[in-house]
Amino acid sequence: MTACREVNSAVDVVNQTIGERMGVNRTDHRVMEILNRLGPLTSGELATASHLTTGAVTAVVDRLEQIGYVRRVRDTHDRRRVLVERTPDGTKSAMRYYSPFMNRSFELMNEYSVEQLEAIRDFMRGAAEITDEYAKELRAAETDSADAPKPG
């Protein structure tokens, strides 16, 4: 668990620093990461993936669109749907900072066998799933406790 906490803290610092250099806040940066990982999404899908309200996602997308990191586009399969996608400028800006980090990560991965990397991948995905589930539980408990009478 200590190693997991160390990685989480280190990645958090890297993401915060890169976000600052790109001129975005942490929430905006997280939304950009989600779009990078999952591809174009509707605002509703982005709200679900980011655990934000649709109103908050609209504000994030507005900010990111204004600085040229994302854009709204019509879905080519359903013209009624609007998707949010990263722009080439947004990707270029992010890769300016992430490429050296990714290259170092690939160098580290080369020290492990395919089987070891598969086990690490499975652990990381399982940890991400547990973390996501726990975040949902915490949010649900927060909503429940907001309705409960306050002590004192």
Image (tube, rainbow, N blue to C red):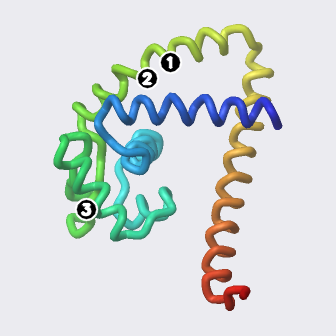
Q: Amino acid at mark 2?
A: Tyr
Q: Is residue 50 left or right of residue 114?
A: left
Is the residue 148 above or below the residue 65 in the image?
below
**Which one is closest to the eye, mark 2 or mark 3?**
2
- Residue depicted at 29% across the width and 53% down the height: 84
Q: Nearer the viewer, mark 1 or mark 3?
A: 1
Q: CA distance from mark 2 to mark 3?
A: 28 Å
Numbered badge on residue 98: 2
Q: In this figure, which residue is indicated by the disc labeled 1?
A: 101
Q: Residue at x 20, y 58 (%)?
A: 74
In three-dimensional space, the C-alpha distance between marks 1 and 3, rounded to whole angstroms, equals 33 Å
Q: Residue furthest right?
A: 1
| Tag 2 near tag 1, CB within 8 Å | yes
Measuring from the top left, give residue 83's x and y in whole percent: 29, 57
- On screen, residue 63 versus residue 44, left or right, reads left
The residue nearer to you, when weighing 56 against 119, is 56
Residue beneath the point at 43% across and 63% down: 47
Residue 65, compared with residue 93, is above or below; it is below
Q: Residue 150's x, y, as percent? A: 68, 86
Q: Residue 92: x, y in percent?
A: 28, 26
Label number found at residue 82: 3
Secondary structure beneath label 2: helix
Residue 39 appearing in the image: no
Is residue 82 or residue 140 the one in the foreground? 140
3D distance between C-alphas at marks 2 and 1: 5 Å
- Amino acid at circle 3: Val
- Per the image, label 3 sits on a secondary structure element best described as strand
